[in-house]
Image: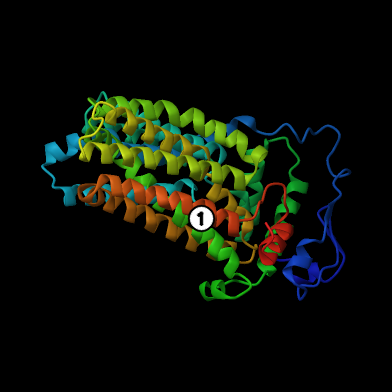
Amino acid sequence: MAAVNKKLWEEDVEYGGIRVADDDPKKPLLQQQQKPVVVNVSDRVPDEVDETNGSTGMVLFSTFIAVCGSFEFGSCVGYSAPTQSAIIEDLKLSLAEYSMFGSILTIGAMIGAISSGQIADFIGRKGLMIVTGASLAFLMGTVVTWRTLALTGLIPCIVLLLGLCFIPESPRWLAKFGQEEEFRSSLQVLRGRYTDVSSEAAQIQVYVASLQILPKAALTDLIDSKYIRFIVIGVGLMVFQQFGGINGVGFYASETYASAGLASGKTGIILIACVQVPITVLGALLMDRSGRRPLIMISSSGTSVGCFLTGSAFFLKAHGMFLNSVPFLAAAGILIYIAAFSIGMGAVPWLIMSEIFPINIKGVAGSLVVLVNWAGAWAVSYTFNFLMAWSPSATFAMYSGFSMMTILFVVKLVPETKGKTLEEIQACINSGKH
């Protein structure tokens, strides 16, 4: 929007029914964000136009296409667990070769996460669709071959690819790059042919213009003392999320069950699939009721207990003690671990990441955090088989220790973000009072 520039923030102006109070761009960002934006649009919509009557069909269709990406990501995550032994046998892979195969799956999942927008938002419907995709892959992998399972993963990809040809481009993205005509056309398609979108279009344009005024942050700005606390919290949560062992446990669950002596690893896989979806739904419901900190600490406690039980099962097996109880103890440990991770540690770190970063560093800081997260995912998925060959009990003891360290990290550094504005969160982090 060429007409909206820095002067918009220096004067009291009115644009498209939106009044923007006087703001000095030289003032600290914290003060700028505290300025209210008063929207006065009551006289802009004709009586005969119902602005709430948007194009529901197009919105639902666009949402369906978007979540296909998340579903495909979940399918990729769940592919390895039920098919590991068959892949190793058919392709005659060594332990090192299959570990490399698993790490390649992790890279593929990362690409799917980026393309589906999962990096920006790992909560709500997307998180549920990811878990649903993984659970469905777990279940299908127990009854079809690994080649057939791989082919079924193409279905959401094809739906996503074809669907993208029919959904409109993001209006905010078009406004950001100054494509005025395309921006209004896209917004009109999403809201409905007879909907007055002038006020919403004006709000989006003013918002985009305000973002362009903010100073651009570089990677080197992240080590600045005023941002370092935010970076430590974001990076730390992702490190603890991954090094708690989720990708190792999830990717190689069937072989873990088999190693513990369970008669059929497929039974354990089915149990995981049945547990994941309802627990993830419960976590989504609790996220805004219990608060972020309690949910992470409860989740980490559960993953620690789950790893401890699984490690204890392998310890008993190695020493020939209570052998009849070992498979059940291992199965219980894995199920507790998966359930506990699904209720908090899977989604909440991503939510906190989206809430804590100041707006001017959100892009570059988010990219760093995502890089750390996926580097950790690759490292865990690649090393899991080698660690299990070395000592299964020690491997799960290490993961249990990381989960306990997560609780200490949250208690000392992570603020509660539920119901707080960005300014309140920043003040809380800078003061160290959580």
Residue 259 in which image quadrant: top left
Q: Residue at x 55, y 71 (%)?
A: 222
Closest to the observer: 149 or 185? 149
Residue 333 in which image quadrant: top left
Q: Is residue 111 among the parts visible in the rendering?
A: no
Q: Secondary structure at mark 1?
A: helix
- The amino acid type of the residue labelled 1 equals Leu
- Residue 295 percent location from the top left of the image: 58, 42
Q: Residue at x 67, y 42 (%)?
A: 188
Whether 7 is drawn above or below 315: the answer is: below
User: Which quadrant, please, contains the C terminus?
Assistant: bottom right
In the image: residue 358, left or right of residue 23: left
* Extreme residue toward the left, this view: 92
In the image: residue 117, left or right of residue 78: right
Closest to the observer: 163 or 66? 66
Closest to the observer: 378 or 411? 411
Closest to the observer: 321 or 381? 321
Q: Is residue 217 among the parts visible in the rendering?
A: yes
Q: Residue at x 64, y 72 (%)?
A: 226
Q: Residue at x 65, y 43 (%)?
A: 291
- Residue 116 percent location from the top left of the image: 46, 45
In the image: residue 329, left or right of residue 85: right
Q: What residue is disc 1 on?
A: 237
- Residue 414 percent location from the top left of the image: 60, 56
- Residue 1 percent location from the top left of the image: 69, 62
Disc 1 packing (10 Å; few <14; some 14–19; many ≥20): many
